[in-house]
Image (cartoon, rainbow, N blue to C red):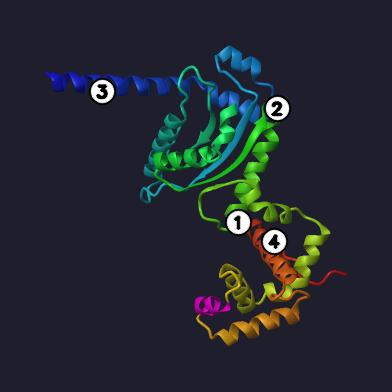
Amino acid sequence: MRLQEMYLAELATSYQAERDAIAEERSGAAPLIARLLILGQDARSDADRLGTELVDNYDVLALRVSPADAGPAPAVRAIAERRRLHRMLALLRTDSGRPAVLPLLDRHGGHVLIPRSDGDATSPDRLDRLLAALRSAAGAAIQGAAVENIPIGEMQAAVRQADEVLDLVEALQVPAGLHRPADVFMAYQLSRPGPGVDALLASTTQVLHQADLRATLEQYFDCDLDRGRTARRLGVHPNTVNNRLNRIAELTPYSPFSVVGITCLSAALTVDRLRRTRGEAPVDGPPG
């Protein structure tokens, strides 16, 4: 009887939690407030009406969840993705008496506005821990971008910046994790169009369009300028790597053996990767 009592108590608790989750999803208070803030609208009157407490500053978290691997049937995959979405939303549900976390998520990701308090400055890894918990709840890889400590009236621009950071890390094939603008600041700036970027690409186009030279340059940077490791990665003799690097120095104004040349060639590779990912036409010739 004691075992039955424990079982019924757990069953009732689980049932009530599920009912609360369904009621919250149906009311849509938190997603509605999040949507209004993300659109740049004043949500305070709606928050008061719906009993949602707002704070002055939020951390903006943009998420993209890997597709569920649940077999070829789309219906089965959709069910699996809905279930993991429910688990993520349950994790983000805020205890009563605290400012609400405001999620606006679907099966593929979305945005979460996390209330900021004075003590959060002393725990800079709290967003990393939150992403790890979401990844565990979802049972899938999650790519995340965070823009932190944003005034409530500046949500729209912060969400746009977080999305751009996600676009960059996906284009550069960065492993899944939490990324901040400072982590990709060079790629972020290089992704902006301008005559300087076009000139950089035009001056390196002969290298970027030759498969062996491009592959050598990419591996050279990935191996932290270690020519021996580069040769082993490519399956060639070290002298071949040296010859290709010298050829790169001949075809471009930049030497892969100097600090300035390394910086410019790395930047050119980054820009070219971003443009290829976005389907933009490459720059074909030298600047006029």
- Please tell me whether mark 4 sits on a helix, a strand or a loop: helix
Which of 67 and 7 lies nearest the eye of the viewer?
A: 7
Mark 3 or 2, nearer chain start = 3
Name which residue lies at 64% across and 37% down.
159
Q: Are marks 3 and 2 in contact (CB under 8 Å)?
A: no
* Kind of residue at disc 4: Val
Mark 4 or 3, nearer chain start = 3
- Please tell me whether mark 3 sits on a helix, a strand or a loop: helix
Q: Which residue is mark 4?
A: 271
Residue 228 sits inside the magenta stretch = yes
Q: How far apart are the alpha carbons under marks 4 and 3?
A: 55 Å
Mark 3 or 1, nearer chain start = 3
* Kind of residue at disc 1: Ala
**Residue 255 picture location, percent across and down:** 73, 76
Which of 99 and 32 lies nearest the eye of the viewer?
A: 99
Q: How far apart are the alpha carbons under marks 2 and 1?
A: 30 Å
Which quadrant: the C terminus? bottom right
Q: Residue furthest left?
A: 1
Q: Does residue 255 appear left or right of residue 216 in this picture?
A: right
- Please tell me whether mark 2 sits on a helix, a strand or a loop: helix
Q: Are marks 3 and 1 in contact (CB under 8 Å)?
A: no
Q: Which residue is mark 1?
A: 171
**Residue 182 picture location, percent across and down:** 65, 48
Q: Are marks 4 and 3 in contact (CB under 8 Å)?
A: no
Q: How far apart are the alpha carbons under marks 3 and 1?
A: 46 Å
Q: Which residue is mark 3?
A: 10
From what the image shows, is residue 169 above or below residue 14?
below
Mark 2 or 1, nearer chain start = 2
From which residue to which does the magenta span run?
A: 227-234
Q: Which residue is mark 2?
A: 153
Q: Nearer the viewer, mark 4 or mark 2?
A: 2
Q: Nearer the viewer, mark 2 or mark 1?
A: 2
